[in-house]
Image (cartoon, rainbow, N blue to C red):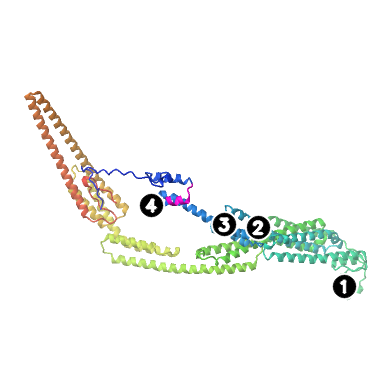
Amino acid sequence: MFPFFSRNKMSDAPEVNPAPAKTQEAHPLDALTGGAFSAATSGERASRIRDWLATQPAQEQLQEVFKELSGRDKGAARAVRERLDEIRRAKGQEAIAAEWAEKAQALLAAPKLNIADALAWQRDAAKAGAPLSREPLSLLKVQVADRVKVIEDLQHRVQVQREAAVLLAQRIEVLSTKPWRDAHAALELLRADVARWQEQAQELTGDASWASVEARFPPLLDASRTQLLVVWDAFQPAVAQAAAAAEDANAPLPPVPVWADELRVARGLPTEAAAAAAAAPGAAAKPARTPNKPKVDPEVRDKAVQAVRDALVVLEKETAEGHGKASAGAAAALRAVLKNHGKHIDAALEQQVHTALVAAGELEGWQRWGADQVREDLVAKAEGLLNRPEGQALGGRKMQETLRALREQWKQSDQGGAPNHGLWKKFDEACNAAHKVVEAWLDKIRADAAEHKAQRLALIEEVKAWTQEHATSGDWKAINRALYQFGDRWREGGHVGEKIFAELQPLWKQAIAGAAAPLEAAQKDSLARRHAMIDEAVALGAAPALRIDAVKALQQRWQAEAQTVPLDRKHEQKLWDAFRKPIDEAFNRKSADREKAVTELSARDRVVLDASKALEAANATGDAQQIRAAVQALEAALRGQAQAAEAAASAQKSEQSAAASVAQADEAAPAAGDGEAPAAEEGGEAAAAPA
């Protein structure tokens, strides 16, 4: 039902004026907050609180003001609460910052710093909410990063030293294929390079951060040193022996085959190969001749130089473009060409070849080291998926996405360097162990989907059975309520896959459409009847005389229709407004007529007053004729006043009785379902809008 106004608009009863408010005493905290507690409005109170907060009050004062203000004005107290929360967060961050600063200082003070621990410190500090951008953590973060950079630089230099040792050994090997005089000429340069290599290796091991490098790097450097010194220690005596053999024909030949053959030829002796051929059967038939030093064919030399230059161009191109795998292959190809044709090239080209090999070795070593660093980090992440603290464990979907991302990153790392099968095995085992969580989650998803599908199919069958059971029911409100309940149950039926939902949705629409068909037909008929009643209301409102009994009967019919057939709330509101509008206008016209009658009655009162004054003036003159005329005029005015008052009272009485009868009927009728039935307002006004 629609609520009536608590007081008739046309009532003559005077309103009761409220008692004047007592003067409130000033709150004790007004002086502190600048009069916030005595402010007249909430906006003014909030403004004064903000001004007071700008003075940076103490925490105790904030707590006291919040305690008093939270019960009076929650909006103004919100600013105080936010300031208290900010202070608590700041204190919490200070404690967290102190804790993580202590951990960082312990890391920096340790003689051996693990790179993984340093990276984990920054990651875990960020997760814990430590203010890394503020002192002292910002400075400690820079110090930890610098320390890690130093360690990584040491590890990179180990890789470079390893490649340099390999290249020095290759230079010695190439010199062993050339004349011994070339080796003797390059001896001092090689001695300086080997000494410089040893000095650089000693600098690495003597660095303060050498203890923090990974355990695999020191053995690599020691193995490179051992291998280089073995080759160098064998090369120096061989060169000295070759020089002595060149000066003394009786001195023993060096152990290098190329140099020994060269010295045999210089002594006029056959080479080792020729001696072996002469010792073979049938060799005595051939005449012996003293070989001279062989001269290199210019065509052979040109072909050798061209082959070396072609391999060198390929290596320099791959190295400049940063292709790690391709540069390693090009370097191997150049070494093979150099082994076959190295004795036919000049010193300038040989130096260019060694420079290119050094550059390729540095690039390959750096990319291999960088790729292994990435792989080790991925292995640690994969192993840490199942070792997370309680409360931070990853769910199935998050675990699946993380594993996909880790495997994709591993593929990218394989593109930047040679594969590392040992690390791959550890990574794959960790990923497979973590994937068991994904498998359990997928099994649960499939089981839940099957259960939800069965529930939805059961709901569809329930709707079909309900449709047959209530096919002849006329309780449209109960049917509408049941349909809404079915819809809610379908929406809350749980998650199913897109394919299953595409199969179930048409079945559901068909079932719910069959269940709603009788209600939709009844609503269509109800709409037709309501439009007809709206037309009747328009006709009643346009009539010269408002028929209260007809309005009452029409309102009762509308109310009965609204209680019987429910409609959409918004649609029913629009229909109700259209039905009410002409009746409101008719009542407004009657109110205007009543006010007009009251105005006419006031005019009659003024006529009577003027006639009375005229009679008093006639009495004062003492003229009998004037007195009689004044008396007759007064009597006529009194008769007109009485007739007008009687007509106004009769009209008001009839209107009030009609409005009271309509209101009484509306109060007796029950409320409608979604829409509300109209009711006439007290005092002849239009009915109020639905709640």
Circle 4/circle 2 CB separation < 8 Å: no
Magenta segment, which residues? 56-65
- Image check: 421 left or right of 335? left
The image's mark for residue 98 is: 3
The CA distance from mark 4 to mark 3 is 37 Å
Q: Residues within 10 Å of mark 2 (few under 14, many from 20)?
A: some
Whichever of labels 4 and 3 marks the residue nearer the N terminus, that label is 4
Q: Which residue is mark 2?
A: 147
Mark 2 and mark 1 residues within 8 Å of each other at the beta carbon:
no
Q: Is label 1 in a helix, a strand or a loop?
A: helix
Q: Nearer the viewer, mark 1 or mark 4?
A: 4
Q: Is residue 424 magenta?
A: no
Badge 4 vs badge 3, beta-carbon distance below 8 Å: no
Label 2: state its secondary structure. Answer: helix
Q: Nearer the viewer, residue 535 or 365?
A: 365
Mark 4 vs mark 2: in front: 4
Residue bearing mark 1: 276
Give the distance between the C-alpha atoms of the residues marked 4 and 2, in whole angstroms: 55 Å
Residue 59 falls within the magenta-colored stretch: yes
**Main secondary structure found in the magenta portion:** helix
Q: From the top left corner, tell me how far across and down residue 192 is, in percent.
A: 81, 59
* Pointer 4 residue: 71
- Which amino acid, mark 3? Ala
